[in-house]
Image: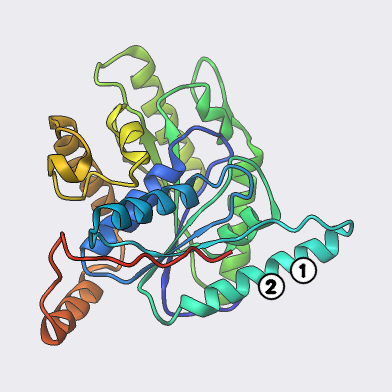
Amino acid sequence: MARQGAHVIVVGNEKGGSGKSTTAFHLAIFLLYQGHRVATIDVDSRQQTFTHYVRNRRAWNSEHQLALPSPKHFHLPAAWGDSVKDNHRAEFDVFRRAIAEVEDRVDFIVIDTPGFDTNMTRLAHSLADTLITPVNDSLIDLNVLARADAVTGEPVETSHYSRLVQRARSERLSIDGQSIDWILVRNRISMLSSRNTRQVQTMLDRIAARFGCRVSDGIGERVIFRSLFASGMTVFDPLDEELLGGQPSNSHVTARQEYRSLVAALNLPAKARAETHRAAAEIVAAPPSVHARYTPVPCHA
C-alpha cells in the first residue's frame, strides 16, 4: 500500500488490556493541541474502544457546547464473507480508501489495533512509521513479546506478535526502504519499586536489544483514565471542574506530564509541522474559545 505525506503511528499489542486505546487517543488529542492535523483509525471490529472514545468526546462536546479538538475518525469493520481471499481484498480496499482520503490532509494518522491477530492488524503494522507497543508492568505480559529464560531473563523464543512485527519491518524495508521505529512502552507502572519491576525492566531491555527496538516509560496505574472515558476527555483538556464533570486532581497533572515525556521519547517529526500550522492558524483567525459552540462530525463507517 504505497503512500506518502502523513506520519503513521500504530499502537499494537496482541495482549488485551494493555492500554492501547487510551494511549492512542491521548496521543491523538495531544498532537491536536500542538497544532497538528490528526486522523484516527480503529481497526478493532469487536471492542471498538477507540471509536467509542471518540464518540463519547463528540457527544460531550455537543451536550456542553464546547469546542474541544477532535480528530477525523474512521472505524474500519472486518469483512465477514465466506471467502477469506475476498474478505482480505475487501479489507485492503477499505483501508486503502481511508488512508487515501486523509494522507495528504493531515500530519499524523493514529491507528489502534485489536488484541489479536487479524488481516487489518497486519495491514496497519505494515503502514507504521512509528509502532508503539504498550506492555503492562508484569512478567506475564512480556510473553506477548518473547518467552524468556526464567534464570537469565534472556529471550529464548520469539512470540507470534514479535514475528508479525519483524515481518512488517522486513516488508516495509523492501518496499520503500523505510524502517519502522518500534517502541516498547512500560504501561501501568507501579508507584512502588519491587523485584518484579526490576525484572520487567531487565527483560524488556534484553528483548529490545534482540529485536532492535527501544524501551520507554509510559503511564502509571491511574484510576483517572477510567473516569475520563465516559466523557471522552483526556488529561490534556483544560483542568476545569465543570468541563471534566468533577474536581481535577494531582493525578491529572502527573499523567499529563507522563504523556508529554512519552511523546518526547517517540521522536516524532512534530516540531516543524506544528510551527507551520500554528503560524497559518494565527494568520487566518484567532483560536476559538473553549466554550464556543461546536458541531461534531460523525464517525465514518
Residue located beneath label 1 in the image: 89
In the rendered image, residue 135, in percent from the top left (x then y), is placed at 44, 34
Q: Is any part of residue 58 visible from this angle?
A: yes
Furthest residue toward right: 82
Question: Callout 1: helix, strand or loop?
Answer: helix
Quadrant in the picture for the N terminus: bottom right
The residue type indicated by label 1 comes to: Arg
Quarter holding residue 291: bottom left
Q: Is residue 205 above or below residue 282?
A: above
In the rendered image, residue 3, in percent from the top left (x then y), is placed at 53, 78
Question: Callout 2: helix, strand or loop?
Answer: helix
In the rendered image, residue 40, in percent from the top left (x then y), is placed at 44, 62
Res 187 label? none
In the rendered image, residue 199, in percent from the top left (x then y), is placed at 40, 20
Mark 1–mark 2 distance (CA, rounded to whole Å):
6 Å
In front here: 258 or 166?
258
The residue type indicated by label 2 comes to: Asp
